[in-house]
Image: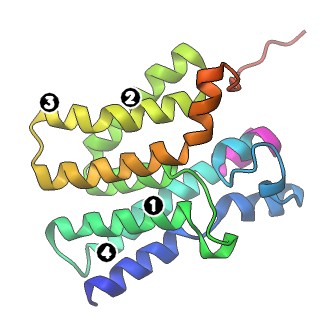
Amino acid sequence: MKIIEVVVFSYLIGSIPFAYIVSKLFSRVDIRAKGSGNAGATNVLRVVGPFAGVVVLLLDILKGLAAVKLAALFIDGRLIYLAGLAVISGHCWSPFLKFKGGKGVAAALGVLLAIKPVYFFYAVLIWLIVFSMFKIVSLASITSALFLPLALILKGEIPSVLIFITLYSGIIISRHNQNIVKLIRGEERKIQLLKRRK
């Protein structure tokens, strides 16, 4: 299988709109018309419920993981990072959703898990620290995407790998442009995972 075929296949895996599918199955709603309108796990969590949100999160991570693992069967070395870029792009710009989609975070986590689990650990650790402090998903995601390349620079990662990781992060940050505006204005919503009973 040639590299172009692998990239196209990875893109198609990434483009499977699990947020849309799960929302339709669980509550018969079009997630694009509810909440923030984003076809991602966070919006599903808010609109459909925590269980559906977790299901979408895991499925989106899985497609990132699966795309890179399958790509590794046909291409060698750092070329698998291209498959990672393709699956994240498919998630963000799905042809099944008129080239709209999620923000790439979960798919990118799956890619990182497939490429090198320690990258996944760094990204999740940064995310958890920021989320535990502010309870804002978008802020945690943006911060994780921003600081992951910096963490790998400090770790001494090679330039070719850093380029791809930075591209992944750049996509995620750019997809959060509206959230960045809301954060600046102080309008971004928090998520309380555990609500106190009255």
Query: Residue 4 location in percent, x, y?
Result: 32, 85
Q: Is residue 151 above or below residue 168?
A: above
Q: What amino acid does circle 1 point to? A: Ile
Asked whether 73 falls inside the magenta stretch, the response is: no
| Lower position in the chain sequence, tag 2 or tag 1 | 1
State whether residue 71 is above or below residue 183. below
Q: Dot 3 lies on which element? A: helix
The correct choice, above or below, for 90 with respect to 45 in the image is: below
Among numbered discs 4 and 3, the one appearing first in the sequence: 4
Write down the residue under mark 4. Answer: 71
**Could you say whether the residue bearing mark 1 is in a helix, strand or loop?**
helix
- Lower position in the chain sequence, tag 4 or tag 2: 4
Mark 2 secondary-structure assignment: helix
Residue 112, position as x, y percentages in the image: 33, 51
The tag on residue 153 is: none
Q: Which residues are magenta?
A: 46-55
Horizontal side of 32 relative to 129 (left or right) equals right
Circle 1 sits on which residue? Answer: 88
Report the residue marked by disc 3.
154
Residue that badge 2 annotates: 125
Q: Distance between the Cα atoms at labels 4 and 2?
A: 27 Å
